[in-house]
Image (spheres, grey):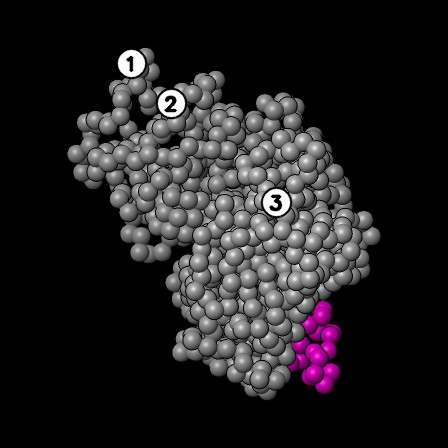
């Protein structure tokens, strides 16, 4: 069923006739070029609604990327939205918060002596509550160590010395960034994680979604999951040149503001278009990261040379990318002319409470937080540093920097920022008066134990590059969180008010 | 109570639960806490059940799914977009739900993240259990994180069912997978017509489940449980998988 949302945004062209769009069928292995659709437009027959996959017989109907990935993982030739299927899992990720519970359930259901389905397909990444004196939090990392040792889990990014993260060679940090950096994200695969932002990996053209402990316990024992409903796909086509002051965070906040926090519930969000093709992998990750904030089941971006380049530099495991068929059925189509978009924020207390950054310039803020899987990657810090350098000023409010992973932390200290005469992010941050970049973890994005660095312990106003701003998200229930891009966060730090980055970037 | 009977087949939950059996004549323990007792003489607005079985007796694990499932007690009303941070703030996620002691502790923190505008607390400070059996919500209940601690803490606190206009998918799925709390869909904005402290009954039947608010006298149709039905009826994802032959019976 097509969505009936009619938007009055001038940048949005909503098409409900997506079934007739007639995309040319891209080859499985060649790079998918969206420009081709302007050249050849075939009208294909409209698919019959409400049929089960068994009824299609020898007639193969078009499938979306997500449908194809799930069909392959279910060892079926065809699936349609609404199907209940058992799906093979390629990678299961868990962390310190949900890992103990997931393994607890696994043992209870499969037996104390049970073995996991495949010790090389499970990735255990402590990242949530690491640098804290909270005894239970520390114990949870110890619990995971025990399980990993017992099960011979190959990928356990352990930390034992909490006083110095650099003394832990295996420790990575934020799970979703680590998964990508360590080569666990591959096109065409099924990745599940005990964390809602597992959808981040959809940037790699795979099916990636968050699950709870019970489902994870089930996967641990069987390597399969029951997908109760194959999701229908909403398509978001973003075209146009990305303005220099705009980032992927602005794009996803724009979209969530458009469709609301439940706009994509039970659905896939597929992103394509010339703008998407121009995005780096880290920017694509930011985009897919917040799919869950719109209620989405998963997000996907068609893999291309950018994807293959990133992946092949990090893993030698073979993969098979898939793409939506030309005659695939989409439940909704949204089109954006990105060149006309402006920096936006999500005001308290909802990720869909969208407003133009420039219209919030009277909002006085108390602090800025740059970090998390959404906005704590290397390019996020590069962007903030670039703005600070262009401005040449000092921040007016405490500005907390939490690199997502060890690698990001090292990049912040080692990589020169383009156009800054050889200065690194760390040097620029220091000159601007920011706090020293801290140990990599999820940090205060979700509040955490009371002693978490940069936790909102008072009812303050914070501009943050994180993903959620519901009441109490970063700690204090009356805290006010404005979600923003790294550029917007940096600009706001310089003025002490919510600030459009064009103040300093143009 | 049906949710409690789910527990007897769902081994993911600790064994040391208070006995769910009630013996007739019906005297809900929750009514003791009601500030006004206008509703002690309950007059259900739906056809009374067959005389051979009290509707408030626990449905046994062996009962067929066609039998009635009933939840009864006080309502706790919340609004739209109640996210998982409000249901169970992140600082309590160090509690491991599969650990029986920590499971109980989780219950004591249920819905503690709600803003101060909610004058009635779901669980009184110092208590571990709630006096409210039925949570009434608006749109997108349980949005946000995938933390299973969310439906777990509600169940651990003693809530039996949520009746909301709509759910976020991971929360709904976790509720079904764990069997901790029965997620039900209302057709209208029940949260606008019920108040915290109302006495209500939820009756699940083939085709026409209802929420009866005894305090207001209103009755609301509930939508069919849909795809989750077979999984809930089996007793959670593990029981369902065993029945479907996907995994062998639980190891000793």
Magenta includes B92?
A: no
Mark nearest the camera among 1 and 3 is 3
Whether residue A162 is situated above or below residue A101 in the rendered picture: below
x then y, percent, for residue A260: 45, 57
Q: Are marks 1 and 2 on the same chain?
A: yes
The residue indicated by pointer 2 is B68
Bounds of the magenta segment: A410-430
Q: CA distance from mark 1 to mark 3?
A: 58 Å
A226 sits left or right of B233 in the view: right
Residue lying at 73% horizontally and 53% vertically, measured from the top left = A26
Which mark is drawn over residue B51? 1
Q: Indicate which disc, 1 or 2, sits on the residue closer to the N terminus.
A: 1
Q: Secondary structure at mark 2?
A: loop
Q: Toward which corner of the image does residue B208 lie, by quadrant?
A: top left
Kindly check if marks 1 and 2 are in contact, taking CB atoms under 8 A apart as contact: no
Q: Is residue B106 visible?
A: no
Residue under pointer 3: A45
Quadrant of res A431: bottom right
Say whether residue A420 is magenta.
yes
Query: Could you tell me if the residues under marks 2 and 3 are in contact, i.e. CB atoms within 8 Å?
Result: no
Residue at (34, 37) in percent of width and height: B134
């Amino acid at each position: 069923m097509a969505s009936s949302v009619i938007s009055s945004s001038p940048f949005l062209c909503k098409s409900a006739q997506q079934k007739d769009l007639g995309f040319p069928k891209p080859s499985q292995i060649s790079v998918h070029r969206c420009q081709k659709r302007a050249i050849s437009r075939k009208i294909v027959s409209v698919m019959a609604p409400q049929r089960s996959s068994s009824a299609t017989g020898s007639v193969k109907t078009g499938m979306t990327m997500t449908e194809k990935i799930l069909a392959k993982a279910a060892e079926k030739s065809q699936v349609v939205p609404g199907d209940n299927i058992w799906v093979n899992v390629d990678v299961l990720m868990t962390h310190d918060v949900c890992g103990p519970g997931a393994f607890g359930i696994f043992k209870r259901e499969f037996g104390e002596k049970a073995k996991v389905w495949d010790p090389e397909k499970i990735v255990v990444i402590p990242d949530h509550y690491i640098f804290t004196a909270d005894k239970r939090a520390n114990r949870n990392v110890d619990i995971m160590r025990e399980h990993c040792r017992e099960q011979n889990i190959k990928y356990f990014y352990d930390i034992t010395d909490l006083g110095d993260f650099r003394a832990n060679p295996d420790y990575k940090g934020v799970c979703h960034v680590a998964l990508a950096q360590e080569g666990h994200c591959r096109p065409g695969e099924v990745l599940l994680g005990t964390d809602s932002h597992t959808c981040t990996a959809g940037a790699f053209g795979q099916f990636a979604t968050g699950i709870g402990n019970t489902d994870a316990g089930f996967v641990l024992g069987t390597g399969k999951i029951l997908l109760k409903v194959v999701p229908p796909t909403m398509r978001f086509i973003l075209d146009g040149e990305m303005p220099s002051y705009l980032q992927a965070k602005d794009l996803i906040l724009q979209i969530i503001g458009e469709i609301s926090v439940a706009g994509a519930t039970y659905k896939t969000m597929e992103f394509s278009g010339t703008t998407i093709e121009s995005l780096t992998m880290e920017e694509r990750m930011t985009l897919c990261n917040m799919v869950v904030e719109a209620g989405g089941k998963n997000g996907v971006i068609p893999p291309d040379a950018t994807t293959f380049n990133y992946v092949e530099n990090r893993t030698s495991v073979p993969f098979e990318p898939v793409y939506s068929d030309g005659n695939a059925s989409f439940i909704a189509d949204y089109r954006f002319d990105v060149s006309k978009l402006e920096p936006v924020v999500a005001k308290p207390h909802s990720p869909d409470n969208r407003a133009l950054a420039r219209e919030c310039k009277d909002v006085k803020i108390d602090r800025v937080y740059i970090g998390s899987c959404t906005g704590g990657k290397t390019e996020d810090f590069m962007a903030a540093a670039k703005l600070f350098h262009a401005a040449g000023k000092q921040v007016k409010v405490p500005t907390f920097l939490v690199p997502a992973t060890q690698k990001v932390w090292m990049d912040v200290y080692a990589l020169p920022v383009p156009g800054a005469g050889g200065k690194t992010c760390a040097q620029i941050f220091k000159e601007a008066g920011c706090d020293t970049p801290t140990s990599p973890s999820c940090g205060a994005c979700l509040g955490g134990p009371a002693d978490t660095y940069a936790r909102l312990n008072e009812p303050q106003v914070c501009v943050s590059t994180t993903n959620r701003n519901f009441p109490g998200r970063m700690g204090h229930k009356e805290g006010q969180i404005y979600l923003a891009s790294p550029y917007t966060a940096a600009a706001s730090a310089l003025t002490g008010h919510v600030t459009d980055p064009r103040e300093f970037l143009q | 109570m049906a949710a409690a009977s789910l527990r007897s087949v769902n081994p993911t939950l600790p064994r040391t639960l208070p006995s769910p059996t009630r013996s007739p004549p019906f005297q809900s323990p929750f009514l003791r806490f009601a500030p006004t007792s206008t509703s002690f003489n309950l007059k259900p607005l739906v056809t009374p059940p067959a005389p051979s079985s009290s509707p408030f007796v626990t449905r046994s694990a062996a009962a067929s799914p066609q039998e009635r499932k009933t939840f009864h007690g006080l309502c706790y009303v919340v609004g739209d977009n109640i996210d998982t941070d409000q249901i169970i703030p992140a600082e309590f996620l160090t509690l491991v739900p599969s650990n029986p002691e920590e499971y109980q502790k989780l219950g004591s923190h249920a819905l503690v993240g709600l803003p101060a505008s909610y004058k009635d607390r779901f669980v009184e400070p110092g208590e571990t259990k709630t006096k409210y059996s039925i949570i009434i919500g608006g749109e997108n209940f349980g949005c946000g994180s995938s933390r299973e601690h969310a439906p777990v803490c509600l169940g651990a606190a003693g809530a039996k069912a949520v009746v909301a206009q709509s759910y976020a998918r991971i929360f709904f799925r976790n509720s079904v997978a764990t069997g901790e709390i029965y997620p039900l869909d209302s057709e209208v904005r029940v949260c606008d017509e019920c108040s915290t402290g109302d006495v209500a009954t939820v009756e699940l039947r083939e085709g026409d489940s209802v929420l009866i608010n005894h305090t207001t006298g209103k009755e609301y149709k509930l939508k069919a449980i849909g795809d989750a039905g077979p999984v809930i009826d089996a007793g959670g994802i593990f029981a369902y998988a065993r029945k479907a032959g996907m995994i062998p019976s639980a190891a000793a």
